Amino acid sequence: MRQSAYAVDTERTRVEDGYGLPAEETVVVHVQLRPRRGSTRRCLAELSALAAAHPDIAFAVTGLAKDDRVVRVTVGVELGPREAIARFSPQAQAAYAFVSDVFTVLYDHMPVYAAEPSAAERAAAEVLLGDADVEAAPAVRVPAPRVVPAPRVLA
């Protein structure tokens, strides 16, 4: 990646990466979860539980879309400023750990890295999050696996 430096004003010099983005900008990684239509609520509940386990991480549902089989939930995870990521700051390491956990814990919901969501996907996510009243919403119940009793052996 090519980097160049130029003077923006007389007091400050700013470094840009090869794509023309300022180095101070925050980097966001988008991960798309693709749960089957019947397990979308469970996916969101598991994502919520994962977020509770990582309270310092800034993330948001940035896009929603669907097709015949799956719902595509795009999650944007803030890694931090470019310079801090290059130095492996604690914030960046924690964000990478969260992304790693998304892939590990939510493996059943087929996570993949994704591009930034389209305007329609962003609008759908805003409608969903706008309709959800976080304080008044009941907790989503994730069904527990069934416990099958062991067979009894008669003596």
Image: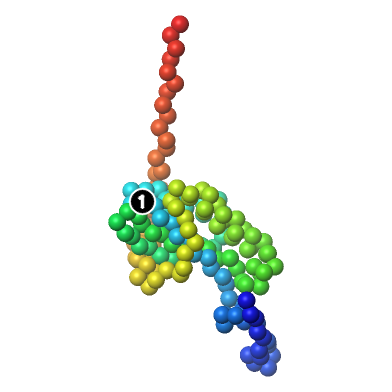
Q: Nearer the viewer, residue 3 or 87?
A: 3
Numbered disc total:
1
- Residue farthest along the top direction in this orientation: 155
For residue 13, side relative to residue 57 (left or right): right
Q: Residue 142 placed where, x, y %?
A: 41, 43
In the rendered image of this protein, does residue 14 appear above or below residue 59?
below
Question: The N terminus lies in which quarter of the figure?
Answer: bottom right
Q: Is residue 138 visible?
A: no
- Which residue is pictured at 58% across the width and 76% down the height? 25
- Which residue is pictured at 52% across the width and 53% down the height? 103
Q: Nearer the viewer, residue 75 or 103?
A: 103
- Which residue is pictured at 53% across the width and 49% down the height? 104
- Residue farthest along the left direction in this orientation: 68
Residue 141: image quadrant is top left
Q: Is residue 121 visible?
A: yes
Residue 63: image quadrant is bottom left
Q: Which residue is mark 1?
A: 36
Q: Residue 54 placed where, x, y %?
A: 56, 54
Colour logic:
rainbow
Residue 95: image quadrant is bottom right
- Residue farthest along the bottom direction in this orientation: 10
Q: Residue 140 placed where, x, y %?
A: 39, 47
Classify mark 1: helix, strand or loop: loop
Amino acid type of disc 1? Arg
Question: The C terminus lies in which quarter of the figure?
Answer: top left
Classed neighbour count for the residue bearing mark 1: other residues with Cα under 10 Å, few (<14), some (14–19), many (≥20):
some
In the rendered image of this protein, does residue 80 appear above or below residue 142?
below
- Which residue is pictured at 67% across the width and 61% down the height? 90
Q: Residue 45 placed where, x, y %?
A: 43, 50
